Amino acid sequence: MNGYGAYKRTSVETADQKSLILICYDEAIRSLQIGKDGFLKKAFEEKARQFIRAQDFISELLSSLDLEAGGEIARNLSDIYNFCLRHIMRGDINRDMKAIDDVIAMLSELRSAWAQLDMRPRVESRPEEVTGEARAFSVGA
């Protein structure tokens, strides 16, 4: 493994929950953009590989949701992630890159919201509790 690969692996393995969520958003968005470029350049194998990669990152976000602890927020995120997965497939099958742009915009907006989220426990809460939308994700994510 080269130095960059080792660094990237270590940074992911040691990242906190919020950082992992942001990495998933960043990589999903990046993969969709590369896949869309592949489609426009008629590099269909690369397009397919990148769309699948984006779906993998979205699936990771989906699987890390804690629907019980996260309540309505987690259910809403689940609906959004499932919509994104279906929309990527539909866009790919129909060769509709506007659908891919829609998913990129949606994920970018969610990513921005997560980036602004303060994941530190509130003073009045117990230290092991996580506030707000962060409870939508399981602690092990």
Image: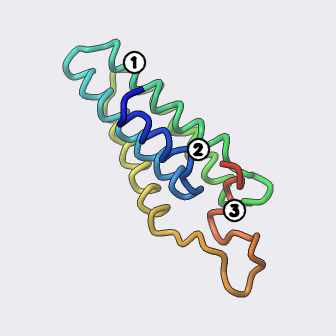
Residue 48: mark in rendering: 1
Decide: few, some or many residues near mark 3? Use Cα within 10 Å; few <14, some 14-19, many ≥20. Answer: many
Q: Is residue 99 visible?
A: no
In front of the other: 88 or 25 = 25
Residue 85's x, y, as percent? 53, 33
In whole angstroms, how far apart are the C-alphas of marks 1 and 3? 33 Å
Residue located beneath label 3 in the image: 135
> Residue 74 at x, y = what percent?
67, 55
SS category of the residue bearing label 1:
helix
Picture quadrant where residue 6 is located: top left
Verify CB contact (< 8 Å) between mark 1 and mark 3.
no
Left of 128 or right of it: where is 38?
A: left
Q: Which of marks 1 and 2 is nearer the N terminus?
A: 1
**On screen, residue 115 above or below 32:** below
Q: How crowded is mark 1: few (under 14 residues within 10 Å), some or many (20 or more)?
A: some
Q: Name the residue under label 2.
A: 61
Label 2: how many Cα within 10 Å (few below 14, some 14–19, many 20+): many
Q: Which residue is drawn at 67% across and 54% down?
A: 137
Amino acid marked by disc 2: Leu
Q: Which of marks 2 and 3 is nearer the N terminus?
A: 2
Q: What element carries label 2?
A: helix
Query: Residue at coordinates 45% horizontally, 63% vertically from top-left?
Result: 115
